Structure formats: structure tokens, C-alpha cells
């Protein structure tokens, strides 16, 4: 072992110089060094040192208070390191190598990430997201729990003396270390260490309070992607105290339809700031004329079709004669399919919250940001399946929010400047934990939009852990296969649907994405549905030009990675098309049961219920590969020319819900249908139309009902969430019958 001298440092350093202050790289590897062999005074003169190799020595720790302000790379591999806290003074460190240190634990690695604010690469892996998570999110969760322990068990002595304060600190820290539990057991040592530090800091803040400026951007995770903390969200979101809900409902009524302004932008058009900013919510204007529709010229106003009784052959198409054996079979199929939901009852929904959580620059005056997609989180169990949650994810503008429907609080918020999110989807993937521990299921979110990038987010840990490019054009829809949670479908404006395997993640959030299939389609996909009985072999996509079915089965029988459609499903309304009416755009699609599908054609004031199994069983036309949907029933809906007002279903409660362009929600309890309703020849009336709750804002008056772009329900229908085209999330709650 050589003694560390100035001469040795000059020999081992570069560039070659006669001044320690000018050395940028230093190699002291394999010299048999121990901690006492490193002179702090001499080494502290290396003010320009950027890279330092100490591998292959016998170091258990580094000297405390060693300050090397320019050091960004340190190699401590193949040593005997035990105490990593001695690295805390190396605050500029960006890359650290610690392999082959037998005594380093997972908790020690976590300590390093918490201590070194600029650490990006650890043992060759990118840990930047983990560093931010540990330093801010993890610590914030611990701090919340520590404060709860204090408020429950402790208070400051009166009078405050040094002796009493010392005893209080010792007792408080001990109790906090025992009671605060968070994170996996493999990092319990790190958690206790961090709890002790935070507990001391908190007690100090109570005795010596100091005002600190608000830290901005402390939760940046990656490339300006911001995951806001709950404390800040309370200030920027949500229900303004000046908003009042005055709900009105008209059950089963044929409501008059007023002319309304057209939505300023459609999902098929990417918006410029000026276009988006042109939409403002204002008190109702009775004199405003309707604008031209987005598809085709203005059509002449027609009477509401739902008010007319039509022959059964008009409902189901010319292929079925009134009162035929086929029709009787159709009715029997519908009633048979609804047996599983026959025990459900209609629900009573009341408005609970109106939120503005996607505002540009958190402005309460923003009534122009359009919200496009929402979905409830499924709670995974040990098998990967699960029940419902009161957490709903919403997206629109440059942000994605996770909202607690009961409290109306935004629990997580993720922002990407310059993005405009159009779609999102929840899934459950496996997270490997290493060290022989079994993998655990975790709920993740995928979101995408204008930039063609898919963002992968683990909301529970507030980590945006990855992204990948799914298309060079905007993404219109995302959908996970819930029977195989790592399979993700993305639809984009380049007229393709791509199937990806995003795999799972490890404890360091490493992941790998593989492209599996490309489905060639003729226009932009708006919705993707996977049949519940065959989610791995068939895919339905609702597009601008119709409803298409694809074979997505992977295996030896079909190895093609690019596939064309298996068949197109047509509807009876197509026969009524003319130069002013194009009904081919399918802007709503969802399965109600394993067999019954609900779909909606743009400019058609009804919702079709049709049988997937009987439709699929038909032989496609040889020329154009079309089959006609086996329609079971029609549901009366709004008469509007606004497109992309998506419907959704709640299979567990036999409900279908679709919003309209007046802020209303048309609800249908399908198990409430009676056999004689199917023979009347006219669309079935809604169970209830939930009126726009008319929130009132100070100095603005009543807010006019906007278009409802998307709706979502949890599996038990405790909550219903509706998204508007004017930056409002409306949460409805089910009332418990007395």
C-alpha cells in the first residue's frame, strides 16, 4: 500500500500538471487503500476533480466531510463498503459504481439515492426517476405518517427547555421508527433511517419555525414531466367554493333539443393554441345559431326520430320481417343475455363534484381545454384481477390526473408541456423485487396523444417511469388487454393499430417494449374493444369509416406481423345514407355483457344493442367482407350533429351511459327492459336523463351545459364521471336507497 502524497496524486492524475487544483481525472485503483489512508486535507485540494477511480481497494467508508465540488463520477466497486452515508458530502456526484461490495444492501442503495441529489447512473443503470421519487414522493409519504404520529401522541413541553426537548426528541424518534411502516420489507432499514432524519427535522421546525420559499419543479420526473404533490394540488384544482350544484333530472322524458354551438375542435384535428382558446364557457345564449357539422354539409333539421313509432323492420333492417321467427329468437337472445344482470336495480345518481383540474397554467378562467378520456382504476388481487376503485384517471390538454371521486381531490397529476393527451388506459403488470422476493402486481397507466408517445406511469409511487414512440403521428386511442396486462394496443392517425408487449418492471423500473402486431386500417381508429370471451384473438375498432374486426391471435397458425381486417360490421342505418347524412362513423363502442355490444353511429339518434356471437357467426360477403350486425334493440338518444360523444357501459350493473351536447347524461338500465318493449318497433326510452347540474360561478352566472366527450363508471356504479369539452370533470355519486 502506497502512502497518498501530493507526488502520487500528480502521478496518478490527468491532465499532467504540477498543481492538484488542475487535476480532472484520478486513478487510485488497486492500491490496498483503507479509510485512514485517505488524507482529507490533501484530497480537498482537488477542486477540479471530475472522475475518481477507487476500485479494488479495502475501503469500508470514505472520510467524512470530504468536499470535491466538481466530482461527477466515482468508482468504488470491489471494495468493502459498509457505511454509504459518508458519501453525502459528494453532492455533485452523477454516476456511481458500487458493484462487488458484499456488505451493500438494497437499503444502502436507497440511502445513496436519497443522499446524492444529482445521482443519475448507479451501477450502470439509469436511476434518475428513482432518485426523484425517493427524495420527494417517498419522503413526503413518510413525513405525512410522521406528522400523524406526532399529532396523536406528542406535544411540545411547556416551558420548552433543552433537557425536556432532548428527551422528547429521543422518545418521538423512537416511536416514529416503530410505528411508521411504508414500502417493502427489503428497504425497512432505509425507511427507519429516513424516518429518523425527517422526525428530527420536523421537531426542529416546530421549535424553530422558518419560512421557506416554495420549491418549484421539485417533483419533475423526466423531461419536464411533472407529477404534482397532493399538497400543491389542493391549491390549484378543484371545486371552487363559488361553484354550486343545482341538479335537475327528468326521468324517461323526450326532451326538446336546442340549437347549440358546435365543439370547436374534434379529436381528428390537432389544435393550435388559438383554436383551443376560442372555446369559452359563458352564461347561456339563446340567440346563438348552430354551426356547420364536421362531416358533410348542414343537414336540414328533422323531427326527433325517437318520438315516432316505426315498423320493426326499420329498426332491424330489411333482412328481418316483423314478428318473424328470427325476431322472436332475437328477443329471446337479449333476454337470455341479461339474466346475469337481472338482479340489479336502477340507481339514483346525484352530482357531487365539478372540477377544473386540467387548466392551462392552473387558471380558473380556463373553460377551453377539452377533456377526452377517463377510466377507473381496477384494484389488482393476487391473480391480477380485481374489483373497483374510487380512483379515476382523466386526461386532456397537457395533463393527466388521478382523482379520488369521494373527496374530489386530485391525488396525482402528471404534466407534459407541449403534449395534448387524447387517451389513457389502466393495466396491472408484475413488478419484480429481486433478492428472492416474489413479484407483486402493480397498477399502471398508459397515456398518449398529439406527440405520438406513450407515457408509462405508476401512480401509486408517483413515478412516470418510461415512454416509447408508438407513432410519428398523434395517438387517438390506447387499450390494454386485461387478460394479459402487458399487451397494449395503440391506435394512431397514421391509420394503424399496433400491439405492444410492454412487459413488467423491476424494482428499478427497468422495462422493455416489443412490437408484436401491426393492424392496417383505412382511417383513424376512435375506439378499441376486445371481446370479453376472446380478448387475445379478436379486436373490434370503431373508426371514421365503420366498425372493423381483426384477428389478433398470436401463435404458429398465424405468424404474420401485419394483418388486414377479418370483416367489417355494418348497421341498418347505413341504408338511409345520402349526400347529407353519413352514418359510417362509429363514435361509441363498448361491451355490455360477454355477447351484447353497445355502439353509436354519428348523426344517428339511437344506440344499437347487437349480438357479437351471432354477428361473428355469419359468413362475410366475399366481395367486401361485410356482415350485418344482428341488432337486438335500439335505445333512444339525443338528436345532435356533434361527433365523438363516447358511450360507456357498466356490465356489473347492466348500465349504458352516454352524454350529449347539452351536458346531459342519458342512462339506460338494460335489465329493466321487458319483452313487450322489444316488439313496439320504436327505440327504447332512457331509464333516466341526468340534467346538466348547472354549476354557478361568482361573477359569471350559470355555466352552460357543455358537450360530454367521455364517461366512465366503476364496476359497482358507486360513481359516474363525465368529461366535458370545456375543462370540467363532473363526478356523480350513487345515492344509497333508504
Image (cartoon, grey):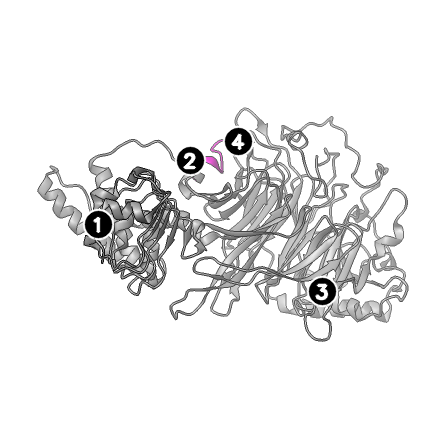
Q: Which picture quadrant has residue 660?
A: top right
> Overall secondary structure of the magenta stretch?
loop
1 or 3: tag closer to the N-terminus:
1
- Judge left or right: residue 109 versus residue 368: left
Q: Mark 3 points at which residue?
A: 561
Q: Is residue 562 magenta?
A: no
Residue 458: tell me if it is visible: yes
Mark closer to the chain start, 4 or 1: 1
Residue sitting at x 27%, y 42%? 67
What is the CA distance from the residue labelled 4 to the residue labelled 3? 48 Å
Marked residue nearer the N-terminal end (1 or 2): 1
Mark 1 — residue? 153
- Whether residue 237 is in magenta: the answer is yes
Closest to the observer: 661 or 696?
Answer: 661
- CA gap between label 1 and label 3 equals 62 Å
Q: Nearer the viewer, mark 2 or mark 3?
A: 3
Q: In which quarter of the image is residue 302?
A: top right
Q: Residue 63 in the image: state x and y as whole percent.
A: 22, 49
Boundaries of the magenta span:
234-243
Marks 4 and 3, the one that precedes in the sequence: 4
Tell me which label, 2 or 3, sits earlier in the chain.
2
Check disc 2 and report the residue beneath it: 216
Q: How far apart are marks 4 and 2 (CA)?
A: 20 Å
Residue 320, percent from left and from top: 87, 64
Residue in the picture at 88% in, 50% down: 576
Query: Residue beneath label 4, please?
Result: 364
Label 4 with label 1: CB-CB less than 8 Å = no
Which is more foreground, mark 1 or mark 3? 3
| 529 is higher (above) or lower (below) than 153 | below
Local packing at callout 4 (Cα closer than 10 Å; few below 14, some 14-19, many 20+) is: some
Mark whose residue sits in front, 4 or 2: 2
Amino acid at each position: 500500500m502506497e502512502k497518498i502524497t501530493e507526488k502520487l496524486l500528480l502521478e496518478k492524475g490527468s491532465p499532467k500538471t504540477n498543481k492538484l487544483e488542475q487535476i480532472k481525472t484520478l486513478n487510485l485503483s488497486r492500491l490496498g487503500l483503507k479509510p485512514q489512508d485517505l488524507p482529507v486535507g490533501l484530497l480537498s485540494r482537488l477542486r477540479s476533480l471530475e472522475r475518481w477511480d477507487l476500485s479494488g481497494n479495502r475501503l469500508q467508508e470514505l472520510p467524512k466531510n470530504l468536499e470535491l465540488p466538481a466530482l461527477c463520477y466515482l468508482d468504488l466497486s470491489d471494495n468493502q463498503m459498509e457505511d454509504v452515508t459518508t458519501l453525502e458530502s459528494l453532492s455533485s456526484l452523477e454516476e456511481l459504481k458500487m458493484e462487488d461490495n458484499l456488505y451493500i444492501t438494497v437499503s444502502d442503495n436507497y440511502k445513496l439515492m436519497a443522499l446524492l441529489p444529482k445521482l443519475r447512473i448507479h451501477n450502470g443503470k439509469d436511476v434518475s426517476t428513482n432518485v426523484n421519487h425517493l427524495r420527494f414522493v417517498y419522503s413526503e409519504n413518510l413525513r405525512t405518517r410522521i406528522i400523524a404520529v406526532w399529532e396523536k401522541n406528542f406535544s411540545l413541553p411547556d416551558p420548552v427547555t433543552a433537557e425536556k426537548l432532548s428527551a422528547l426528541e429521543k422518545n418521538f424518534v423512537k416511536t416514529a421508527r416503530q410505528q411508521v411502516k411504508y414500502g417493502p420489507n427489503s428497504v425497512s432499514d432505509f425507511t427507519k433511517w429516513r424516518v429518523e432524519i425527517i422526525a428530527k427535522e420536523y421537531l426542529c421546525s416546530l421549535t424553530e419555525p422558518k419560512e421557506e420559499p416554495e420549491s418549484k419543479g421539485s417533483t419533475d420526473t423526466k423531461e419536464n414531466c411533472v407529477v404534482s404533490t397532493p399538497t400543491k394540488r389542493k391549491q390549484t384544482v378543484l371545486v371552487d367554493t363559488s361553484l354550486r350544484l343545482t341538479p335537475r333530472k327528468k326521468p324517461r322524458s323526450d326532451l326538446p333539443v336546442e340549437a347549440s354551438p358546435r365543439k370547436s375542435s374534434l379529436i381528428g384535428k390537432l389544435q393550435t393554441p388559438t383554436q383551443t382558446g376560442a372555446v369559452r364557457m359563458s352564461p347561456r345564449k339563446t340567440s346563438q345559431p348552430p354551426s356547420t357539422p364536421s362531416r358533410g354539409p348542414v343537414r336540414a333539421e328533422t323531427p326527433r326520430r325517437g318520438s315516432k313509432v316505426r315498423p320493426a323492420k326499420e329498426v332491424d333492417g330489411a333482412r328481418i320481417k316483423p314478428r318473424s321467427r328470427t325476431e322472436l329468437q332475437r328477443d329471446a337472445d337479449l333476454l337470455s343475455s341479461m339474466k346475469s344482470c337481472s338482479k340489479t336495480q336502477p340507481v339514483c345518481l346525484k352530482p357531487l363534484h365539478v372540477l377544473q383540474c386540467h387548466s392551462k397554467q392552473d387558471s380558473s378562467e380556463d373553460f377551453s381545454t377539452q377533456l377526452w378520456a377517463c377510466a377507473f382504476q381496477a384494484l389488482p388481487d393476487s391473480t391480477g384481477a380485481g374489483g373497483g376503485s374510487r380512483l379515476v384517471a382523466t386526461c386532456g390538454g397537457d395533463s393527466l390526473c388521478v382523482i379520488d371521486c369521494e373527496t374530489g381531490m386530485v391525488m396525482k397529476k402528471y404534466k407534459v408541456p407541449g403534449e395534448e393527451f387524447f387517451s389513457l388506459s389502466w393495466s396491472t403488470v408484475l413488478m419484480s423485487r429481486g433478492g428472492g422476493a416474489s413479484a407483486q402486481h402493480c397498477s399502471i397507466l398508459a397515456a398518449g396523444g398529439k406527440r405520438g408517445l406513450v407515457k408509462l406511469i405508476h401512480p401509486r409511487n408517483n413515478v412516470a417511469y418510461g415512454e416509447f414512440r408508438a407513432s410519428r403521428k398523434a395517438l387517438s386511442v390506447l387499450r390494454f388487454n386485461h387478460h394479459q396486462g402487458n399487451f397494449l394496443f395503440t391506435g394512431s392517425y397514421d391509420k394503424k393499430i399496433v400491439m405492444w408487449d410492454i412487459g413488467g418492471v423491476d424494482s428499478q423500473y427497468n422495462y422493455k417494449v416489443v412490437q408484436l402486431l401491426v393492424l392496417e386500417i383505412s382511417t383513424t381508429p376512435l375506439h378499441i374493444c376486445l371481446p370479453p370471451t376472446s380478448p387475445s384473438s379478436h379486436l373490434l375498432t370503431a373508426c371514421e369509416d365503420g366498425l372493423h374486426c381483426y384477428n389478433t391471435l398470436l401463435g404458429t397458425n398465424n405468424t404474420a406481423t401485419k394483418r388486414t381486417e377479418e370483416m367489417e360490421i355494418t348497421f341498418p342505418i347505413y341504408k338511409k345514407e345520402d349526400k347529407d347524412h353519413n352514418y359510417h362513423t362509429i363514435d361509441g363502442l363498448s361491451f355490455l355483457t360477454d355477447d351484447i355490444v353497445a355502439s353509436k353511429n354519428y348523426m344517428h339518434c339511437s344506440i344499437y344493442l347487437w349480438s357479437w356471437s351471432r354477428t361473428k357467426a355469419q359468413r362475410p360477403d366475399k366481395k367486401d367482407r361485410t356482415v350485418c350486425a344482428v341488432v337486438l334493440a335500439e335505445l333512444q338518444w339525443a338528436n345532435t350533429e356533434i361527433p365523438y360523444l363516447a358511450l360507456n357501459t357498466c356490465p356489473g350493473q347492466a348500465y349504458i351511459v352516454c352524454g350529449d351536447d347539452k351536458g346531459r347524461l342519458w342512462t339506460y338500465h338494460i335489465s329493466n327492459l321487458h319483452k313487450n318493449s322489444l316488439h313496439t318497433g320504436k327505440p327504447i326510452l332512457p331509464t333516466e336523463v341526468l340534467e346538466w347540474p348547472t354549476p354557478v360561478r361568482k361573477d359569471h352566472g350559470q355555466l352552460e351545459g357543455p358537450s360530454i366527450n367521455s364517461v366512465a363508471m366503476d364496476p359497482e356504479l358507486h360513481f359516474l364521471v363525465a368529461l366535458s369539452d370545456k375543462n370540467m370533470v363532473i363526478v356523480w355519486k350513487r345515492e344509497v336507497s333508504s
